[in-house]
Image: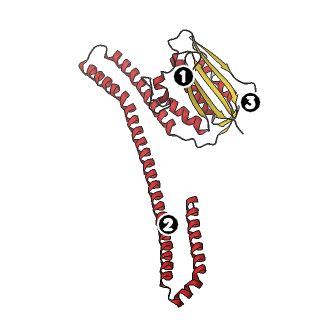
Amino acid sequence: MTNKSHLFYGAIGVIIAAVFILCISFIDFSFSALAEYNVEFILKLTALACLIAGLFLLLRCYHLMHKEREHIWQETIRRLAQNERENAWQEMARQIAHEIKNPLTPMRLSLQHLLRLKKDGAPGWIERFEEVLHTLLEEINTLAKTASEFSSFAKTTSTDPVIIDLNKIIQERRPLFDNYPNIKLSINTLEYETNIKAHHNRINRVLTNILTNAVQALKNKEDGEIVMNLQTTGKFHCITIEDNGAGVDKAIEPHLFTPNFTTKKSGSGLGLAICRNIVESYGGTITYSHSGMGGACFTICIPKAS
């Protein structure tokens, strides 16, 4: 029972008690009035009783109207939530169809062109066959990557999180990203354990995604630099990853973590959205800011393991 229901029934109780007291107070006068045929007094008492009964009915109607309005409001919220879910799935289906159709079109055109060359006996069609085959393999890899990203975005892990040390996970990224000749990678961890409760592979995916974005932002820069810092702030362990690239335009900052939003020609727009889903599933946050180095800065904060 809600607080409003308690208030309503409390008011009804007070009214009933008042009616009872009034009846007791006037009962002696009523009998004497009847004996003396005091018609005016009887009419006044009857009017008072009708007034109280009317007030009771009014309160009862208000309560029923309130319950009906609350029911309608809850049903409206339920339908809105259902519509939002349906719209989200429709948008996701549209995006999946779009991402699959994009590479299929050049694949079909390439095969059709190759068949014409072979049918016409054109010289060099075998060399052309190797080129087409290479293109098809690239497009198949793109399709596989797209399917994997959509699956990761929708998937929830079935295993329980475990205690892992962020120091160790960060250091594991060094061999993968410290071999670019034009990029200097600096990693600063802590001397004590920085334990969180999470899934090792999912945290790896977050760090790999952001580091890959940083590397791509620096591919045309001769003196590229990426810095990873691990700090402890209150109840959280926080990782910052920043670079000296061009950063993100102010106009698109609000859309960075929105699914399907991308500034890359071959991107699906799910990378950072997946990162946010992963981090938030552990009660953490991931934010973007402009780095003092001139480029992008991503900050990932995850609660300490209790």
Tell me what residue is drawn at x 54 percent, y 9 percent: 222
- Whether tag 2 and tag 3 are in contact, CB under 8 A, the answer is no
What is the secondary structure assignment of the residue under circle 3?
A: loop
Q: Quarter of the image containing the N terminus?
A: bottom right
**Residue 205 in view in this figure:** no
Q: Which mark is residue 59?
A: 2
How far apart marks 1 and 2 lie (CA) works out to 65 Å
Residue drawn at (49%, 64%), measured in percent from left and top? 63
Which of the two labelled residues, at mark 1 and mark 3, occupies the earlier sequence position?
3
The CA span between labels 2 and 3 is 63 Å
What amino acid type should be assigned to the residue bearing mark 2? Leu
Q: In the figure, is residue 97 to the left or right of 34? A: left
Residue in the image at 50% along x and 31% along y: 257
* Residue 148 placement (x, y as % from top left): 49, 33
Query: In the drawing, what numbered circle is on residue 212?
Result: 1
Mark closer to the chain start, 1 or 2: 2
Residue located beneath label 3 in the image: 193
Q: Position of residue 105 (x, y in %)?
A: 33, 28
Element under disc 1? helix
Q: Earlier in the sequence, mark 2 or mark 3?
A: 2
Q: Residues within 10 Å of mark 3 (few under 14, many from 20)?
A: few
Q: Residues within 10 Å of mark 2 (few under 14, many from 20)?
A: some
**Horizontal and vertical percent for residue 110?**
32, 23
Instruction: Give the quarter of the image for residue 174.
Output: top right
Is residue 61 shown above or below 123?
below
Residue positioned most to the top: 222
Please say whether residue 294 is visible from this viewpoint.
yes
